[in-house]
Image (cartoon, rainbow, N blue to C red):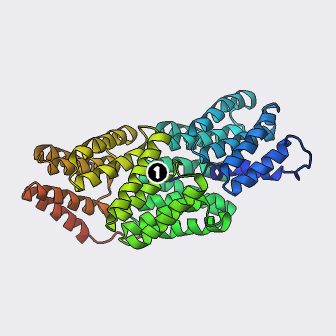
Amino acid sequence: MGLPLHVRCTVLLFAALALLHPPSARGQELSWEEANEAGGQAMQRAQYDEAEKYFEAALRQAQFFVISDERLQITLNNLGAVYHERGKFAQSEALFTPWLEKFEKGLGPSSPIVFILLNNLGTVYQSQGRYAEAEAAFKRSIELGAKSMGPENPRVANSKAGLGTIYMVQGRNTEACLLLQEALEVLDKTLGPEHYVSVRVINNLAWTYFQMGEWAKATPLFERTLSIQEKELGPGHPNVATTLNNLATTYEKQGDFARAETMAARAELIREKVLGPNHPQNVVGLNNLAMIRRALGKTTMAEQDLNRARAIAEQSLGPEHPDLAVVLDSLGTGATDQGRLEEAEPLLKRALAIREKAFGAEHVLVAASLEHLAKFEAARGQFAQADLLLKRALATYQKAFAPDHPDLPLALLRLAQVYRKMQSEREAEALEAQATAIHAQPAPQESGP
């Protein structure tokens, strides 16, 4: 899921709009005000290449302003945001990091720009899969913001949402849900329930509920996100594509594959048109579209989508990014299902290695990789190795999922299927009995928002 940096930085971005002046008719380089205005308008149209040129022109002048000049702070924020939107994460980091040090030294750690640049760096680190660094940046941002602005300030709420998002990505759903709910309550109270600043928080709270298996709570939050985005940004904006992709995944989870494919295909068309065919945001979207098409029996189209996603990820995200692991795992499972075992093995093992490094050994995505690798080992007759992998996967699923999570019995049944292929009836029956027992439990009572 892409998290738009210019949403996270709304305070400075809105300040930029407040400082705008009518454009000049002079036939010379634009003034700071003119360049900033043109960049902001291009950003709103999602013309990020054009926005980058204008904001870089603004920085050429702003770098000579005194360090306390708000125009310098606005320029850095906006240029870093557009770098992030274009997938230029290293450039965004290289812009923010030295200026953060200068602002801390020149204005002190309680300055609002220090708070905001820490927040922005947290987002950049997250986009690079550097979750420990992202967590540290957000925690420091929250600490500084709460001291200088108070814990109920919407800027601090955005930082809490950023930290909650890191926990969401890591599968720390209880912690994520708490932070995202707190942030949304503050934003709804201070800005109103339809304010665009809240979109990121609503979306990520929805995704957290999705990961917890609470689809009835996730779906209306995704729909609320989509409604606000289409109203504020228009139906062809890349952030709309992200939400369409999330809704597609929700529908897929509930077995509505035709509707899911429609949503996912529309999302991919938007991303390719606005961001270009090789943007890193296309990676997860193409993978999701491929999985939906695979479920509909469109295996050739699915394979094409996955190969495109892999090429983009290798080029734009690097060899150890978790999004690349998603695609490698999907390619490996497809190769296993089609009997292309020599091709499947390196894909599945590489996906597992990336996930273990990024998330640790007890993450649900690591369990999924173990399960898929076990299925591969069973397919080539290595039943002892498959058994070891299945036991590891089972232990990880049981730690990652709450006892009443709807995905846990599904995982148990998938593991049972592998045991049956291995002629291990006793193990298969034990897992099926566990799954049946979970299904038979009464549904938990609704509590909280």
Q: Position of residue 270 (x, y in %)?
A: 56, 61
Does residue 448 appear in this view? no
Residue visible at 57% across and 62% down? Answer: 240
Few, some or many residues within 10 Å of mark 1 (<14, 14–19, 20+) = many
Q: Position of residue 435 (x, y in %)?
A: 21, 64
Identity of the residue furthest to the right in this view: 26
Q: Compared with residue 59, is residue 209 higher up or lower down, i.e. above or below? A: below
User: How many numbered discs sit on the rendered protein?
Assistant: 1
Q: Amino acid at mark 1?
A: Val
Residue 231 in the figure: left or right of residue 415: right
Residue named by callout 1: 283
Residue 187 in the figure: left or right of residue 306: right
Q: Compared with residue 345, is residue 273 higher up or lower down, i.e. above or below? A: below
Residue visible at 23% across and 56% down? Answer: 337
418 or 334, nearer to the observer? 334
Residue visible at 53% across and 39% down? Answer: 125
